[in-house]
Image (cartoon, grey):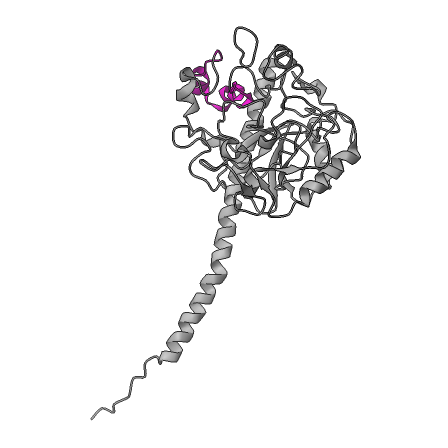
């Protein structure tokens, strides 16, 4: 007769211990998986900016200048409403010739002849880490972007001294415009050729990232809210004297911007349409496809409640303000330089270094290990 043996199963306590161990392992694994996914998204974003930089280089080879911040004028020489911009001029060099051929430079981005292209989403112009799925202008205008041109450093020191700036023709054309007034844009205007980038193309930013606006959101938003990095907030108590060369005033404005309480509110609609169209820009009340090297990466976008420039719309973020490069990448933003190279610039970058990277001809000396 065969002896019998009792088969002992798992006790409840042992089962719970095993489940707890598995849960701990999963909890340890998930952040690693998320980090790996974000690393892949950041690499894709880097590649997008690299391609954009190469497209600009090809534009320069054809036209001998960098693409202007905004163009397209009516018969009177005035900018059209939402004129076509620098990305529109670049896309034929990004294997998007059909999209470029569909653009009509006699009309603005919202005009009917350009609706088809305005409603076209171009994948290379959006960052895969962007968290929104519907663009700033809703489902009818899905052609938004995350990549914005460098318009220069703090306007207090010298405005519009970057790589992507309005042409002087556009400024002169607005001379009799009763809405914008004489000389809306001061600063050092374009067209900008590589010979004008005396700081060196490897030391001058061409474009970076900016989180897109939120469709349907307007009115009061706070600095500390989930949408805070997509809106502009007021800094009062100091007047921004544009082109004064006052670096101390620029630093004081930056400190005031960085110290805004989380409860600070804005009534502007900047976050509602910024980056709304990849092919067009509002040249007055909002830097729709541009940014300013004033506040450091992923910092708050701030506007001065008083400036020396007439007819600005600061509550929507203009060229006089600290319109900041932002992203969902942990720790910084990607920046493509005028030589076509792409660098990840940390949030902790020294402000003066960040300013120097924004200017094209201010003569700053930048150490290779400073960013």
Residue 335 appears left or right of 33: right
Whether residue 181 is visible here, answered yes or no, is yes
The number of numbered badges drawn on the structure is 0
State the image coordinates of residue 65 (x, y, percent, origin top left).
63, 16
Residue that protrudes farthest toward the bottom in the picture:
1
At x 43% / y 20%, what residue is drawn?
99
Magenta extent = 82-106
**Residue 55 within the segment the image draws in magenta:** no
State the image coordinates of residue 159 (x, y, percent, origin top left).
70, 25
Taking 3 as reference, is 185 above or below it?
above
Residue 307 appears left or right of 230: right
User: Looking at the rendering, which quadrant does residue 46 occupy?
Assistant: top right
Residue 1 appears left or right of 366: left
Please state, as top left, top right, bottom left or bottom right, where the N terminus lies in the image. Answer: bottom left
Please state, as top left, top right, bottom left or bottom right, where the C terminus lies in the image. Answer: top right
Closer to the camera, 62 or 231? 231
Residue that protrudes farthest toward the left in the picture:
1
State the image coordinates of residue 125 (x, y, percent, origin top left).
50, 30
Taking 100 as reference, is 291 above or below it?
below
Taking 333 as reference, is 173 above or below it?
above
**Residue 86 within the segment the image draws in magenta:** yes
Closer to the camera, 278 or 123? 278
Whether residue 365 is visible here, answered yes or no, is no
State the image coordinates of residue 126 (x, y, percent, origin top left).
49, 34
């Amino acid at each position: 007769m065969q002896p019998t043996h009792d088969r002992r199963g798992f006790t409840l306590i042992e089962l719970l211990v095993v489940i707890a161990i598995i849960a701990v392992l999963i909890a340890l694994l998930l952040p690693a998986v998320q980090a790996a996914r974000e690393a892949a998204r950041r690499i894709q974003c880097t590649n997008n900016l690299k391609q954009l930089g190469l497209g600009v280089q090809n534009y320069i080879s054809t036209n001998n200048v960098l693409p202007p911040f905004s163009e397209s004028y009516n018969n009177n020489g005035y900018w059209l409403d939402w004129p076509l911009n620098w990305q529109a001029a670049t896309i034929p060099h990004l294997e998007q010739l059909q999209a470029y051929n569909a653009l009509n430079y006699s009309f603005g981005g919202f005009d009917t002849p350009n609706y088809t292209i305005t409603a076209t989403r171009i994948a290379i112009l959006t960052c895969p880490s962007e968290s929104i799925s519907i663009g700033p202008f809703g489902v009818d205008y899905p052609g938004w972007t995350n990549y914005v041109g460098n318009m220069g450093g703090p306007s207090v020191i010298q405005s519009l001294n970057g790589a992507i700036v309005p042409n002087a023709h556009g400024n002169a054309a607005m001379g009799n415009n009763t809405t914008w007034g004489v000389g809306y844009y001061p600063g050092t205007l374009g067209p900008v050729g590589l010979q004008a980038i005396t700081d060196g193309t490897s030391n001058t930013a061409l474009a970076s990232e900016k989180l897109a606006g939120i469709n349907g959101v307007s009115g009061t938003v706070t600095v500390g809210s989930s949408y805070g990095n997509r809106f502009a907030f007021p800094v009062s108590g100091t007047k921004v004297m544009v082109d004064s060369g006052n670096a101390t005033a620029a630093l004081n404005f930056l400190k005031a911007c960085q110290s805004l309480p989380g409860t600070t509110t804005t009534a502007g609609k900047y976050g509602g349409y910024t980056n709304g169209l990849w092919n067009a820009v509002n040249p007055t009340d909002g830097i729709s496809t541009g940014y300013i090297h004033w506040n450091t990466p992923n910092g708050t976008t701030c506007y001065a409640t008083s400036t020396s420039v007439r007819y600005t719309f600061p509550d929507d973020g203009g060229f006089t303000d600290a319109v900041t490069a932002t992203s969902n990448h942990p720790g910084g933003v990607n920046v493509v330089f005028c030589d076509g190279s792409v660098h990840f610039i940390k949030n902790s970058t020294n402000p003066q270094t960040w300013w120097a990277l924004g200017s094209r001809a201010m003569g700053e000396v930048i150490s290779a290990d400073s960013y």
